[in-house]
Amino acid sequence: MTPLVLIPGMMCDARMWGAVPDALGPRAIHHAVPVEGACMAAMAAAILRDAPARFALAGLSLGGIVAMAMLEQAPERVERLALLDTNPLAEAPDVQARRAPQIARALAGDLDGVMRDEMKPNYLADPSDIATLDLCLEMARALGPQVFHRQSLALRDRADQQATLRGFTGPALVLMGEHDRLCPHDRHALMHALMPQSKLVLVPDAGHLPPLEQPDATRTALKEWLEQ
C-alpha cells in the first residue's frame, strides 16, 4: 500500500491533522513539517530527502504549497496529490508587504502576539472554538520564531505553480473549508480546473483547518481519494 506523506500548515505540526490519520491506515503515514530552509524549493527538497521512494502526498495551506514544490522537483515520486486550503499562485504584493513586520515582531519575542492578533482570527469558521485556537498557539510555540521567520520568507518568495499542477495527471483532491478566509474558493476552483481529473470538495462549517474543525468530512474525502 502506497505510503502517505502529510504536510501541515504554517506553524503547525502533526497535531494539525487531529484524528484524521488514524482512519487512513493501515498504510504507513509520514508526518513532514517544513522547517528546513527559507524557500519553498529547500523545504521541498528536505522532505523529499526523507520521504519514501513513491508516495501519496497531502498538504494544507503552507503544506500544500510545499507539496506543489515537491511535485515540481520529483513528479515521478508522487502517485496522488491532495491539496487542502491552499493557493497555487505567487504571493500577492499586499500580503508580501505584511511579512516583514510580522517577522520582526516574532523575532523580537512576540510570536504569541502575531499568532493571536494576525493569524488565529482568520483560521476558523467558529472563532469561539477556543480549544482549537489554543492548539494552534501551542504548535506555534513548539516550532518557535526562527521557523516562523523561515516559513514566512518561503511564502513571501514562492513561485506560481499553475504549470506544475497542469502537468499532473494522477488522482487528485482539492479540498477547502467552505468559510476559509485565507485561501478562498477561487483559488480552489483554479486548482480544480488545472487538474480536471481532481475532485473538488467544500467542507461545510469549516474555515482554514478542516481536519480539526470537521474531521469526519475531511477523513471521508481523503479516504475516497486514497482509494481511487
Image (cartoon, rainbow, N blue to C red):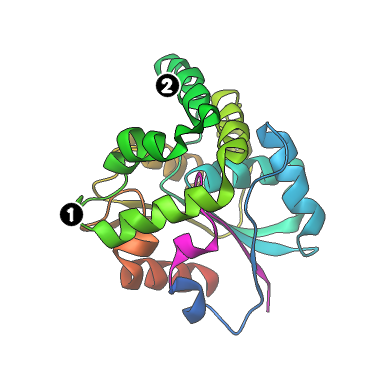
Is residue 13 located in the magenta-colored stretch of the structure? yes
Locate the N terminus and report the quarter of the image it occupies.
Answer: bottom right
Q: Amino acid at mark 2?
A: Val
> Looking at the image, which residue is at 62% across and 53% down?
33
Q: What is the x, y in percent for residue 45?
A: 77, 44
Q: Nearer the viewer, residue 71 or 108?
A: 108
| Percent of width and height locating residue 145 | 56, 37
Q: Nearer the viewer, residue 105 or 204?
A: 105
The reply, left or right, for residue 182 in relation to residue 100 is: left
Indicate the amino acid at tag 1. Answer: Ser
Q: Could you tell me residue 55's position as x and y percent?
A: 69, 64
Report which residue position mark 1 lands on.
128
Q: Residues within 10 Å of mark 2 (few under 14, many from 20)?
A: few
Q: Residue furthest front?
A: 109
Q: Is residue 113 shown above or below 197? A: above
Q: Is residue 195 above or below residue 153?
A: below
For marks 2 and 1, give the CA distance: 26 Å
Tell me the magenta residue range.
Answer: 1-18
Answer whether residue 101 is visible to the viewer in this image: yes
7 on left or right of 122: right
Foreground of the two, 80 or 144 = 144
In the figure, residue 117 lies in which quadrant? top left
Give the residue drawn at x 55%, y 29%: 107
Q: Nearer the viewer, mark 2 or mark 1?
A: 1
> SS at mark 2?
helix
Q: Identify the residue under disc 2.
A: 95
Q: Is residue 197 visible?
A: no
**Residue 127 position in % (x across, y down):** 20, 50
Q: Residue at x 33, y 35 (%)?
A: 186
Residue at point 40% right, 53% down?
136
In the rendered image, residue 227 lying in the magenta stretch gets the answer no
Q: Are marks 2 and 1 in contact (CB under 8 Å)?
A: no
